[in-house]
Image (cartoon, helix red, strand yellow):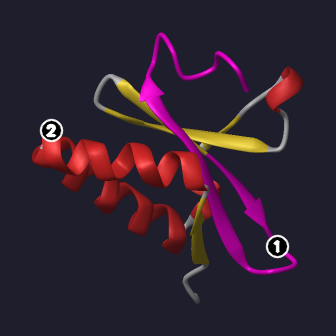
Amino acid sequence: MNSYSQNIEDELLSRLRKLARRDKALYTAVQKKMVQIAENPYSGKPLKGVLKGKRRVHVGHFVLIYEIDENEHKVIFQEFAHHDEAYKGM
């Protein structure tokens, strides 16, 4: 099975750079999870309602939200936030 390419939205990329400075262990866990998702993007839980078409995985108390673009064979990472905040503004 071929890995999907990864695309990280600009706002999330900025947030991950800050996370790398503040909490290296969590940053490393997120990076590993992103690689796992690229290898098996359908492993995440599908979301419902206004977030239909997106998926999520937990990384500790945090949630990583992404979409799968089958036409481009890529995963688009969109949000990473504490579970209590992750779905606000999406």
Image quadrant where one finds the N terminus: bottom right
Q: Secondary structure at mark 1?
A: loop
Q: What are the residue bounds of the magenta stretch?
A: 66-90
Q: In this rendering, would 64 be left or right of 54?
A: left
In the image, what residue type sits under mark 1?
Glu
Residue 43: image x %, image y %? 56, 53
Q: Please state the total of marks drawn on the protein image.
A: 2
User: Contact, CB < 8 Å: mark 2 with mark 1?
Assistant: no
Q: In this rendering, would 64 be left or right of 47?
A: left
In the image, what residue type sits under mark 2?
Arg
Q: Residue at x 20, y 55 (%)?
A: 28
The tag earlier along the polypeptide, 2 or 1, is 2
Q: Residues within 10 Å of mark 1 (few under 14, many from 20)?
A: few
Q: Is residue 88 magenta?
A: yes
Q: Residue at x 40, y 43 (%)?
A: 15
The answer for how far apart the CA atoms under marks 2 and 1 are is: 34 Å
Circle nearer the viewer, 2 or 1? 2
Q: In the image, is residue 89 above or below residue 38?
A: above
Q: In this rendering, would 37 be left or right of 2?
A: left
Image quadrant where one finds the C terminus: top right
Which residue is identified by label 1? 70
Residue 79: image x %, image y %? 56, 39
Residue 37: image x %, image y %? 50, 62
* Quarter of image, res 45: top right
Q: In the image, is residue 86 above or below residue 25?
A: above
